[in-house]
């Protein structure tokens, strides 16, 4: 939610310290006028301690350091100021004369120019034909192929398709509509009461909030939820956890609420946070954007909160939208100048930003960017909201600006943060297959299972090869070079606890295997294919089932873990082998390949109990589907459907009447264990 609302709240929180902060600033000003720069530095430091994230105080702190000939400190704080606001703070003043001969100061001018330079990677998704509609969030209704827009001043959700803009609900709500999230056929959205919704100071809905639940197919509100025994709340974002829990952020109480059994219960709350905005999750980590201070991370296992560290080049203030993407975060910042969208990558513990990239910056359509959603490796976001034009619910839009929604492709962005695959090519000596496979399964793979469970690698697999040069390809995949560079340290720690080598017999590794070569490949996040892949099996049809490759955890519709499936290439990339292990103890293997003669995919399956199944089919309409030939009226049909979140749904249906009717026999959701 937008900046000046947040700043008003921050100021109210800091009122108890306001006189002290201002008195220190006044003392610093008096010392400056008197030429007592040493005392000026003392006082401005005291003021800065009370308001450490205020860019104006940081600017005067840089001046004080410069006047005291603390050259490095002055340049450091100036860089911090420019990262927050590259436009409104003059670095070419006499007070910085001590700095101007230094290379660091000269670099600041280039840094400022670089920050102000536009970066434009998005396309226009839609332009809203309403100059008085203040929108905050955008979602997509898949049942009607319409965009949904939450409105602050008109207190409703609007539906937009091919130039048609209309309210979703017949009557406006008593609150501004802020965040939205879609869960199957359910639309969750939040409402908050403030003046920009047209509420005056006596309105009983002021600083109250609700979470609403509506049916997307009928456009009917099914329920609403408030926090019990709470007089004031300002709900912003609503998100869904991986398990489907509904989470709501509250910038008034700086709390994340979780909907449990029809009630909003406090889940995360911290006195450290001043103005809670965007929230999202990566695994067991919850990321919280504080509009004033930056990013925090909450560990749900340790139940601990930490502020994420950064470099002076990166401002983390003013974050509104926050979205987990490929083990990193995309942030929408409207509390910095210029407005920007940034992709952040972290260290292994998520304590520090290790690298960042501007995805969009100083875009001409950016008039207070706010929130959006991720879809198909793209960010769809509100580029133009009307917070600065909104006066008590009335839009003062003299220039006739229309709200704009942009779509920002992300696939190439993530590819630039190269994941790394390390391949080892192994030759089996003298037919010692048993020794080789025992060795790698109980040593190489054992360490990698440990590393995967602890987030030290992002995946691994062992593949047979038909090459004359080598028999086995071992792949270890790393999210980035940071993981790769740290793996030896983790291996040493693991080996100290697991000393010795697990061998099948008296033969040593050099007696039964030879490392032919190794190869490091930089690629994107998907499981890469060995460079030796057979060119005869590299057509689009041959590669149509590659989305199924990888190491998977499989869950049923209730979210229960039901087994694992390890799927990899065989026969030099011309086939796919599946290795299923059920949590109940069963197992099975299938061999899958594309036959150029029949122009079909084929699967041959055999389970540990002797059940066999042979099917054929192909990839169409976004899914791989194969079915068996009819036998006494019975047909087996299995579909594999890749999802936007890179999971895969497998649905097995059986017909006993030659395909007239079908009954679901198995439903499984595959979730990669390589992320």
Image (cartoon, rainbow, N blue to C red):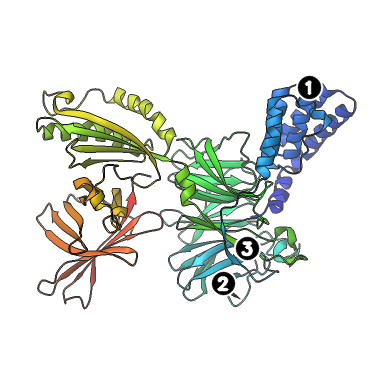
- In the picture, the quarter occupied by the N terminus is bottom right
In the image, residue 446 above or below residue 498: below
Q: Which mark is residue 68?
A: 1
**Mark before the other along the chain sequence, 3 or 2:** 2
Q: Which sits in the foreground, 416 or 650?
A: 416
Q: Which sits in the foreground, 277 or 416?
A: 416
Label 1: few (<14), some (14–19) or many (≥20) C-alpha neighbours in 10 Å: some
Outermost right residue? 34
- The quarter holding residue 101 reads top right
Residue at the image point whose x is 63% and y is 34% from the top: 312
In the image, residue 375 above or below residue 573: below
Q: Which mark is residue 159?
A: 2
Is residue 48 visible in the rendered image? The answer is: yes
* Mark 2 → mark 1, Cα distance in angstroms: 59 Å
Residue 571: x, y in percent? Answer: 19, 47
Residue at the image point whose x is 20% and y is 56% from the top: 593
Q: Which mark is residue 404?
A: 3
**Mark before the other along the chain sequence, 1 or 3:** 1
Which secondary structure, mark 3? Answer: strand
**Mark before the other along the chain sequence, 2 or 1:** 1
Q: Which sits in the foreground, 524 or 446?
A: 524
- The quarter holding residue 609 reads bottom left
Label 2: few (<14), some (14–19) or many (≥20) C-alpha neighbours in 10 Å: many
**432 displayed left or right of 301:** left
Residue 669: x, y in percent? Answer: 32, 57
* Mark 3 → mark 2, Cα distance in angstroms: 15 Å
Residue 533: x, y in percent? Answer: 26, 45
* Mark 1 → mark 3, Cα distance in angstroms: 48 Å
Say if mark 3 contacts mark 2, CB within 8 Å: no
- The quarter holding residue 592 reads bottom left
Is residue 189 visible in the rendered image? The answer is: no
């Amino acid at each position: 939610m937008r900046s000046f609302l947040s700043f008003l709240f921050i100021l109210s929180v800091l009122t108890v310290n306001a006189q002290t902060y201002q008195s220190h600033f006044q003392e610093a000003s008096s010392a400056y006028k008197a030429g007592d720069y040493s005392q000026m530095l003392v006082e401005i430091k005291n003021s800065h301690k009370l308001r450490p994230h205020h860019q104006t105080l940081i600017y005067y702190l840089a001046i004080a350091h410069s006047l005291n000939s603390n050259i490095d400190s002055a340049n450091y704080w100036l860089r911090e100021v420019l990262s927050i606001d590259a436009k409104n703070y003059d670095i070419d003043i006499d007070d910085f004369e001590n700095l101007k001969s230094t290379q660091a100061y000269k670099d600041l001018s280039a840094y400022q120019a670089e920050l102000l330079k536009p970066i434009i990677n998005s396309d226009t998704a839609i332009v809203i034909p309403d100059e008085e509609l203040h929108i905050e969030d955008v979602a997509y209704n898949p049942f009607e192929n319409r965009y949904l827009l939450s409105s602050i001043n008109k207190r409703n959700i609007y539906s937009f398709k091919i130039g048609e803009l209309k309210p979703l609900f017949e009557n406006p709500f008593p609150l501004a509509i802020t965040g939205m999230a879609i869960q199957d056929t359910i639309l969750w959205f939040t409402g908050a009461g403030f003046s920009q919704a047209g509420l005056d100071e006596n309105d009983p809905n002021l600083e109250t909030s609700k979470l609403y639940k509506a049916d997307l197919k009928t456009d009917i509100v099914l329920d609403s939820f408030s926090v019990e025994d709470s007089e004031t709340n300002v709900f912003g974002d609503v998100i869904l956890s991986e398990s489907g829990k509904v989470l709501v952020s509250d910038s008034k109480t700086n709390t994340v609420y979780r909907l449990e059994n029809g009630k909003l219960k406090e889940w995360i709350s911290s006195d450290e946070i001043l103005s809670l905005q965007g929230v999202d999750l990566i695994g067991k980590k919850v990321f919280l954007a504080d509009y004033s201070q930056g990013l925090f991370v909450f560990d749900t296992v340790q139940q601990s909160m930490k502020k994420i560290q950064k470099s002076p080049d990166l401002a983390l203030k003013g974050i509104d939208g926050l979205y987990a993407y490929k083990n990193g975060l995309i942030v929408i910042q409207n509390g910095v100048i210029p407005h920007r969208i940034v992709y952040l990558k972290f260290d292994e513990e998520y304590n520090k930003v290790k690298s960042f990239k501007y995805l969009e910056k100083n875009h001409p359509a950016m008039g207070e960017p706010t929130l959006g959603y991720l879809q198909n490796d793209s960010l769809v976001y509100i580029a133009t909201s009307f917070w600065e034009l909104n006066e008590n619910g009335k839009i003062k839009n003299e220039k006739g600006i229309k709200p704009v929604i942009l779509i920002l492709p992300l696939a190439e962005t993530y590819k630039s943060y190269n994941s790394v695959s390390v391949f080892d090519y192994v030759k089996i000596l003298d037919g010692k297959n048993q020794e080789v496979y025992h060795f790698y399964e109980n040593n190489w793979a054992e360490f990698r299972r440990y590393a995967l469970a602890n987030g030290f690698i992002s995946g691994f697999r062992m593949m047979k090869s038909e090459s004359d040069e080598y028999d086995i390809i071992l792949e270890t995949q790393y999210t980035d070079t940071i993981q790769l560079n740290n793996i030896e340290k983790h291996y040493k720690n693991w080996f100290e606890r697991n000393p010795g080598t697990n061998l099948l017999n008296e033969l040593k590794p050099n007696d039964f295997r030879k490392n032919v070569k190794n190869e490091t490949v930089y690629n994107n996040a998907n499981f890469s294919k060995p460079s030796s892949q057979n060119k005869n099996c590299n057509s689009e049809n041959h590669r149509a089932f590659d989305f199924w490759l990888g190491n998977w955890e499989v869950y049923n519709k209730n979210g229960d873990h039901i087994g694992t499936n390890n799927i990899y290439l065989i026969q030099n990339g011309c086939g796919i082998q599946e290795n299923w292990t059920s949590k109940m103890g069963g197992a099975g293997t299938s061999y899958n390949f594309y036959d150029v003669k029949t122009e079909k995919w084929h699967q041959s399956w055999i389970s540990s109990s002797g059940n066999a199944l042979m099917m054929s089919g192909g990839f169409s309409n976004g899914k791989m589907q194969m079915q068996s030939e009819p036998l006494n009226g019975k047909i087996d049909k299995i579909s594999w459907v890749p999802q936007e979140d890179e999971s895969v749904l497998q649905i097995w249906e059986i017909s006993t009447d030659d395909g007239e009717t079908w009954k679901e026999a198995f439903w499984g959701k595959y979730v990669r264990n390589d992320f």
